Image: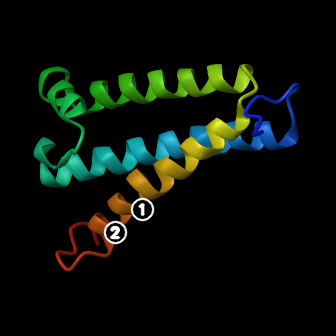
Amino acid sequence: MWRFVERRHSVFGNAVILLFILAQAADGALTYLGVHVLGPGIEANPLLAWMMVHLGEGTALALTKGVATALGAALHVATVHRVVAALVLVYLFGAIAPWIALLFFSPLHLVF
């Protein structure tokens, strides 16, 4: 049977929460850049796009990334480090990589 809960904090757990925080920061920065260049309609999350229109891009991203980081920290404190590691991979392949591909490597050359 798989165990998702570890009994103590570990080097793995500490590394994973650090990667999770960095993933949140990277996703926030890339999202801000993407929305700034392409407009809020490019955001795939309809709730976040709505928040950006009504609260402003920076405020909406700071709020959502702050909540996500706090929830990730709660998972870290609960010692479910494998779940946090899975979330890092989700952010890496589901958010960060697509933004990088769109902004830096697309035929449109949106940023550079």
Camera-nearest residue between 28 and 70 = 70
User: In the picture provided, is 90 more to the left or to the right than 13?
Assistant: left
Q: CA–CA distance between discs 1 and 2?
A: 6 Å
Above or below: residue 9 compared with residue 102: above
Residue 101: where, in percent of width, then height?
Answer: 34, 69
Camera-nearest residue between 45 and 39 = 45
Name the mark on residue 101: 2
Q: Amino acid at mark 2?
A: Ala
Provide the residue designation for mark 1: 97
Q: Amino acid at mark 1?
A: Ala
Above or below: residue 31 compared with residue 56: below
Does the CB distance between marks 1 and 2 fall below 8 Å?
A: yes
Q: Name the residue located 87 percent from the left edge and 36 percent from the top edge.
A: 10
Residue 56: where, in percent of width, then height?
Answer: 19, 27
* Mark 2, other Cα within 10 Å: few <14 / some 14–19 / many ≥20: few
Specify the color scheme: rainbow
Q: Name the residue located 15 percent from the left edge and 28 percent from the top edge.
A: 50
- Does dot 1 land on a helix, a strand or a loop? helix
Residue 39: where, in percent of width, then height?
Answer: 12, 47
Name the mark on residue 66: none
Please tell me in which quadrant of the rendered image residue 46 appears.
Answer: top left
User: If the image is split into quadrants, where does the C terminus sit?
Assistant: bottom left
User: If the image is split into quadrants, where does the N terminus sit?
Assistant: top right
Q: Name the residue located 63 percent from the left edge and 37 percent from the top edge.
A: 84
Q: Name the residue located 73 percent from the left edge and 33 percent from the top edge.
A: 4
- Does dot 2 land on a helix, a strand or a loop? helix
Please tell me in which quadrant of the rendered image residue 97 appears.
Answer: bottom left
Which residue is situated farthest in the front direction here? Answer: 1
Above or below: residue 2 compared with residue 75: below
* Mark 1, other Cα within 10 Å: few <14 / some 14–19 / many ≥20: some
Residue 82: where, in percent of width, then height?
Answer: 70, 40
